Amino acid sequence: MHQESKISSQEIFNGRIFRVTKDVVLLEDNTQANREVVHHHGGVCVAALDEEDNLYFVRQFRYALGEEVLELPAGKREKDEDPMLCGIRELEEECGCKAGSFELLSVMYPTVGYCSEVIHIYLAKELTATAQRLDEGEFLSVEKIPFSTALEMVLRDEIPDAKTQLAILKIHAMRTAK
């Protein structure tokens, strides 16, 4: 089994969403190497399907990319927060609805080369309307898109968000396998 052992670690940034360390590791051949690691509490993504087979999406500006992105509702976990509870909270905050059924679809590692982030992806069904409760400074619009259209959009590369792609393709694969 391949492994690297941490020899030392120096924190070089500590922010609101993540922190960064520069680590020295011992490699398999007994040599040393540097590793820069982004430490992140992780996040959730929710594929919310209504009774008409529409998926709930959010459209929001993503500053790091400099563009508006269409994606499934998602959010970051607080330290040690239960991923499912985070997903339930994020669905209501962003889309203004609750789900009677909440099922884990997948767990993904979006950037394994340098980041500890893990995203838990859920399927939410049996939706009931509540009220949207956006965080301060959060601006987004909610869109409902038929699942078949969303799948076509993924296959045409019109939805570049990885967590959204994975959720849609996983749901499609599960439906096809039945």
Image: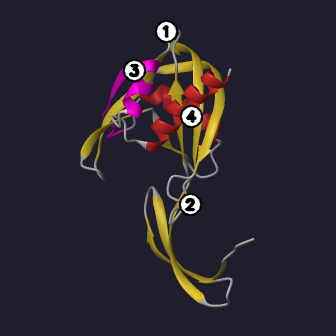
Q: Earlier in the sequence, mark 4 or mark 2?
A: 4
Magenta stretch, residue numbers: 136-155
Q: Which amino acid type is marked by label 2? A: Ser
SS label for mark 4: helix
Nearer mark to the viewer, of 1 and 4: 1
- Looking at the image, residue 92 sits to the left or right of residue 160; the answer is right
Q: Earlier in the sequence, mark 2 or mark 1?
A: 1
SS label for mark 1: loop
Horizontal and vertical percent for residue 42? 55, 50
The residue at the far top in this view is: 52
Where is mark 2, residue-wise? 116
Q: Which amino acid type is marked by label 1? A: Glu
Nearer mark to the viewer, of 3 and 1: 3
Q: Nearer the viewer, residue 22 or 2?
A: 2
Q: How is the image coloured?
A: secondary structure
Number of the label disc, if any, that sits on residue 149: 3
Q: Is residue 38 above or below residue 79?
A: below
Residue shown at 40%/41% (left/top)?
A: 161
Count residues near mark 4 (Cα–Cα under 10 Å), then give few for <14, some for 14-19, many for 20+. Answer: many
Whole-number angstrom distance, CA of label 4 to CA of label 2: 19 Å
Q: Are marks 2 and 1 in contact (CB under 8 Å)?
A: no
Horizontal and vertical percent for residue 148? 45, 19
Q: Earlier in the sequence, mark 3 or mark 2?
A: 2
Whole-number angstrom distance, CA of label 3 to CA of label 1: 13 Å
Q: Are marks 1 and 4 in contact (CB under 8 Å)?
A: no
Residue shown at 44%/23% (left/top)?
A: 56
Whole-number angstrom distance, CA of label 1 to CA of label 4: 22 Å
Whole-number angstrom distance, CA of label 4 to CA of label 3: 24 Å
Q: Earlier in the sequence, mark 1 or mark 4?
A: 1
Q: Earlier in the sequence, mark 3 or mark 1?
A: 1
Number of the label disc, if any, that sits on residue 52: 1
